[in-house]
Amino acid sequence: MAERLEAGHPGRTGTIAATLASHFALAGDDRRTVQYHGEAAAAAKARSADREVILHLQAALERLPRLPDTPERAQAELGFLLDLGGAMLAARGYASVDAEAVYRRARELAARLDVPQAEIMAHGGAYTFHVMRGDLRRARDIAGELLTTAERMPFPLFTVIGHTTLGCALFNLAEFADARVHLERADAAWEPGFPRLALDLAVLHRTMLAFTLLHQGLPAAGAQWIQRSLGHAEALEDPFNLSYAHELAAQYHATAGDRDAALRHADVAIALANEHGFPVHAAVATAMRGWALRDSATIREGIEAYERLGQHVATSFFRALLAEAELEQGRVGDALDVVRAALASADETGEHRHLAELHRLWGECMLRSVGSVDTGSRRRIAPEPAEEQAEASFQRAITVAREQGARLWELRAVTSLSRLWRAHGRKAKARTLLDDVYAAFTEGFDSPDLVRARELRAQL
């Protein structure tokens, strides 16, 4: 029966590949079972049906050892492993332990077969695993090795992978200037004709460049890169990367303080993720939706779902948003607990992208513990101990931000400190500090942070 089906579909067996694989498996034909599971996986991949891809590739890999041990079998295994790793990252989360094991086997096999292109792809998968689990220093090392190898090869795609992965790791480590260099090089080397990857490189490096520019105090430039990323994702007609692009856009606008934009992109990401089964995107977008709605319970829901999937990267950012929401709702103790945990995690992982903002939020928690200092004309003569701690936290945030070149966080911390100084009658000092930092900005004057800074300046 299987052979009749096969003969009846010459050159177009992809549509019935799953059926053929099942029939040939029952017939004990290992070669054609493997062949048609591979074809069925390719057809499922074209539909972004990642769970089907996983089932067919696992079946092919399970049957493969029954075939003669030839170079062709090893090459087939390597291709199956790389596709399986990508499908697992999409369907099970970027920190999938199963995917890490698959990529580890792929790296070993690629090295034995001397296929450097496949070795780079496997390194890229391993990088994704480590970076999403928050092992940023290891991820940076893998990315550096990947870039070094890629630059010795005549394949621009691998150079783009190297610059993208290294730029992302450096961004999370708060090495913003170096991150920007690598992400800009990634985009300069990227070509529209590159082979499609599970996680689209242009979506990733353009969005991460947007984040980097925003942190450096260039919100308008960052927003332009977000639009380029979204436009590219829409042209791909790929639900996974479109969901990812909107989820990242929601994160960008949450960082920039734009609730309406964050909500708009979060809702699109959630709809796509729920329809097609992308749990990581759904979790992160849920947290962004909660921030946009000032709903700390929804933020917690998103963070908890994210961490259940083994994800840890960017949790300092998510917790900063949660602490902000808790403060807005008057739950100072809960906000302090969140910031304390985030600072401890940042110290452990090296994820310092939000370190300055966490110190600023600690200062805001200290102020809320004694009541608001944003009192207009009321003037305090002697600061209370908690206010002294708040001032120290704001100063620490400013120092960290300046060391990192994070002008966005510097402005926020200076705004908080200036507000505190105003309450103690130190308006001239606050005005000088705020003017100096504000003057360094060259664009994005309608962004929420710059608008708030101008409003405060008018009161000094």
Image (cartoon, rainbow, N blue to C red):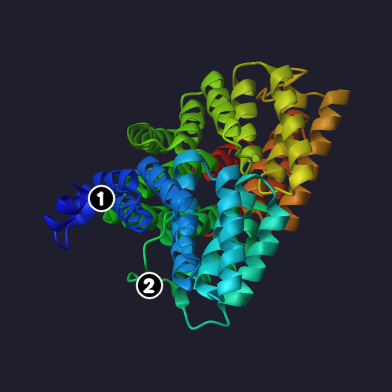
| Quarter holding residue 14 | bottom left
- Residue under label 1: 17
Residue 136 in view, yes or no: yes
Residue 217 in view, yes or no: no
x and y percentages locating residue 181 in the rendered image? 58, 69
Q: The disc labelled 2 sits on which kind of residue?
A: Glu
Q: Of discs 1 and 2, which sits in the foreground? A: 1
**C-alpha span from label 1 to label 2:** 33 Å
Q: Residues within 10 Å of mark 2 (few under 14, many from 20)?
A: few
x and y percentages locating residue 272 in the rendered image? 34, 37
241 to the left or right of 234: right
Of residues 22 and 391, the one nearer the viewer is 22
Of residues 338 and 162, the one nearer the viewer is 162
x and y percentages locating residue 300 in the rendered image? 58, 24
Of residues 100 and 450, the one nearer the viewer is 100
Mark 1 or 2 closer to N-term? 1
Mark 1: secondary structure: helix
Residue at left offset 14%, top offset 57%: 7
- Residue under label 2: 191
x and y percentages locating residue 88 in the rendered image? 48, 45
| Quarter holding residue 310 | top right
| Quarter holding residue 417 | top right
Residue at left offset 78%, top offset 37%: 344
Q: Which quadrant of the rendered structure holds the C terminus? A: top right
404 to the left or right of 197: right
Mark 2: secondary structure: loop
